[in-house]
Amino acid sequence: MRGSNRFLSINGKPVKTPVVLASMAGITNAEYVLERAAHVGAAFIGGFSLDAATQEAARKMIEAGRTEFSDGLDGIATELAMLEGTDVVIGLNLRGSTPEAYVAAAREFGSGVIYEIDAHCRQQPMIDAHCGEYLLHNTDALCDIVRALHAEGVCVSVKTRAGVTDDRLLARKLWAAGADILHIDLMDTGYTRIRQIRNSCPLTLIANNSINAPDKMMDMFSHGADMVSLARSANVATLQLLDRYIRATAEENGWYNAPKQLCRGGDLRSLTFCCMPVKQCPLLPTLDTIGMSRQEYLALKQELTQGTEIAKGSHTCFGSLAWCCKTSTPCMFRDMTLKSLPLPKNEYMAMKRELSEGIMERIFADVPADC
């Protein structure tokens, strides 16, 4: 499988690995990224203070002993120049007190970078400047910034902190406003929160906080994350470990962030593995929750798999691989069918991923208007 298809693309660019450098004040600059570029697919540099209010807040924090970034637009230009030619997708973590401050940055630097709104910082000077966590308590102001950036035609990320507000409602609001990426500091909420957010919106999700080992990374991926990010633990050895592990997983399994099956706590993507709705199981209440009838579910999977290899399989339980489970679950009928086609297991899982993407597109076809 080619790297461009193995993982995902963001801001129109293929990501070579779904391991990300999160912004961390005083550390995440161009030099820091270049030292780690071999093992990350994306990086957010900053945070940068965009206007007088946030630059004054940064000055107060420096005087109090914090080493926060205080650079304005000139600092961004210097950092981006150093990163020209890298194969890492670059984002700017930005702190501004008005939508106009973000728009000015977007017009200065164009669509080649991701613009990440810092709704995460909880230092009081930044909150007083109406940025950082202030925006999580004032979501109308946050959505105004998202809409302003979206109108400029740039890729918009929002760095949030889980548990401050209703994360599911926030995800829907940001989706409706035009965000592309949610970068979520999960704090102590763990993978259950990423699953809730995955089931609330179709945005690219980056899971953050203490993801420094393969098992923690895979927990995030199997419950809805598209990427994982590191900050304080982003040493080269850890990044190399995660990068090599997920590359090997993608090559072997065919779907690097395949969800757990629905009956084992999987998110909505796992509908791709569900069988026909003929028995009492988690599928039936899930269909009720998303407002999809049993007949609609049957027709959708048949439509999306028509003419593909996974439409075959007359000797499987329901007459088609479309209704079969993931390869980590033992099933002699599925495996016999795959062998007879022949269809390697990793290619089967790649097709299940495509089916899942089609199902998710149908579930989230309508942008919410009531949030």
Image (spheres, rainbow, N blue to C red):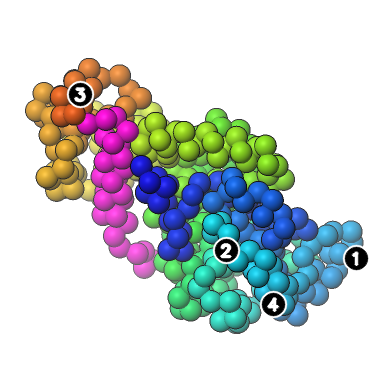
Q: Amino acid at mark 1?
A: Glu
Q: CA distance from mark 2 to mark 4?
A: 21 Å
Q: In front of the other: label 1 or label 3?
A: 3
The quadrant holding residue 341 is top left
Q: Quadrant of residue 371?
A: bottom left
Going by the numbered disc 3, the residue's amino acid type is: Lys
Q: Residue furthest front?
A: 85
Structural crowding at the residue carrying mark 3, measured as other residues with C-alpha within 10 Å and reported as few (<14), some (14–19) or many (≥20):
few
Q: Which residue is mark 4?
A: 73
Q: CA distance from mark 1 to mark 3?
A: 67 Å
Precedes in sequence: disc 1 or disc 4 = 1
For label 3, the residue is: 339
Residue occupying the point 49% across, 67% down? 155
Residue 360, magenta (yes or no): yes
The kind of residue tagged 2 is: Gly
Residue 313 lies, in percent from the top left, at 13, 29
Within 10 angstroms of label 2, few (less than 14), some, or many (20 or more) residues?
A: few
Left or right, 7 with reference to 244: left
Among the 4 quarters of the image, the one containing residue 153: bottom left
Which residue corresponds to mark 1?
A: 63
302 is higher (above) or lower (below) than 132: above
Residue 279 image offset from top left, x and y in percent: 20, 28
Q: CA distance from mark 2 to mark 3?
A: 44 Å
Instruction: Tell me if label 2 and label 4 are in contact, CB under 8 Å.
Output: no
